[in-house]
Amino acid sequence: MEALSRRRALALGGGAALGAAGVVAATGKARAATDWTRLVVVTANIGRNNLARRAEAVRAVRHAVTINGNLAKPLVGWQEIGEGDDDGVEPRAINQHFGSSFRNIFEYDDVAHRVPMSIPRDYDIVDRRVTRVHGGKAGVSPHRVVTEAVLARVDDPQTRFVFVNTHYVAGAWNGKDDPHEGWRDDMWGRHFRAHRDDVIGHWRSRGFPVVWTGDVNRSPMPLLLPNHEKRAFPGGIDQIGWVPGTNGTQIRLQRTKTVPMHVDSHDARVAILQIRRA
C-alpha cells in the first residue's frame, strides 16, 4: 500500500491519516464539536424488468424522503445501471432527476458505470477511486467493481467520510444449483474480501468512517467487520452499512424506510442517518 505524504494526508482530511493531534498541529487549534446533521442514504438496484418504468423508478428514489414538506437530498448508491438495456435511459434519468443539486459520478465510466453514485452538493468530493474485484464470466456475470468517494461537508470540511457502492455476483447464495455454482461461490467470496480488506480496511487505516450501499446477493450477509460494523436492515440483499473511523466524524442511525420502484424484485432502501464531527 502506498504511503501517504503529509501533504496528501492533509488533502484527504488531516486527522484521517495524522490523527486528531495532527489536525491541531496543522491548524493551530482544535475545532469545537458540531451538531448532528441529517444524512439520507439510499441503495437502489434498478434491475432488468419493467424497463419502461426505469425513469419513474429513478424519480421515486429522488422523492424518497420529505422533511417538513421539502425533499431531502439523498446520497445514493445505484446498481445494475445499464444491465437491463444499455440504451442510456438510466444515466439520463439519473442526471435529470438528480440535477444541479447533485454531482453524479461514474455513470459514464467504462469500468464502473453499473454502480454509480449521486452525491448532494452539500458534500465536496475530495477523492474517488474504483476497486476492481473480478473480470466476470461470459454468459454468467459481468465484471464487478467497488466505487468509492471521499466526501467532506461543504460547511465543515473536517467532517469527512468515505461513501462506497457495489454489487456482488448473483446466484452464489440463492439455494439453486447451476453449472457455474463453484465460480459464483468463489467470486462472491473474493468480493467480500475485497470489500472488507481492500476498500473498508484501506480507508479505515487512514482514519475515515465508511458508509456503504450495495446489492450483496446474500441474506443474511455476515458483517464485514463484526466488532465495528452496523447495518440499517437486519436482512435482505439490498443493504446499507457503516463502520466508524478515527478522524472524529461520527455516524448514527435515526430511522429507515423502503421505497417501491416497480421495476424488479428490488425496492429502494433508505437509511436516515445523522453525522457530526465530535
Image (cartoon, rainbow, N blue to C red):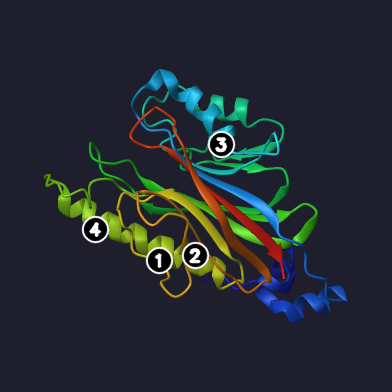
Q: CA distance from mark 3 to mark 2?
A: 27 Å
Secondary structure type for disc 3: loop
Q: Which residue is mark 4?
A: 186
Disc 2 + disc 4, Cβ < 8 Å: no
Q: Residue, x 76% and y 62% (percent of image)? A: 35
Q: Indicate the amino acid at tag 3.
A: Ala
> Which is more foreground, mark 1 or mark 2?
1
Quarter of the picture containing the C terminus is bottom right
User: Does residue 23 appear to the left or right of 93 in the view shown?
Assistant: right
- Residue 200's disc is 2
Q: Which residue is mark 3?
A: 64
Q: Indicate the amino acid at tag 1.
A: Leu
- Who comes first in sequence, dot 1 or dot 2? 2
- Who comes first in sequence, dot 1 or dot 4? 4
Secondary structure type for disc 4: helix
Image location of residue 248, percent across then percent down: 68, 71
- Residue 224's disc is 1
> Which is more foreground, mark 2 or mark 4?
2
Q: CA distance from mark 3 to mark 1?
A: 27 Å
Disc 1 + disc 4, Cβ < 8 Å: no
- Who comes first in sequence, dot 3 or dot 1? 3
Q: CA distance from mark 3 to mark 4?
A: 35 Å
Disc 3 + disc 1, Cβ < 8 Å: no
Q: Indicate the amino acid at tag 4.
A: Asp
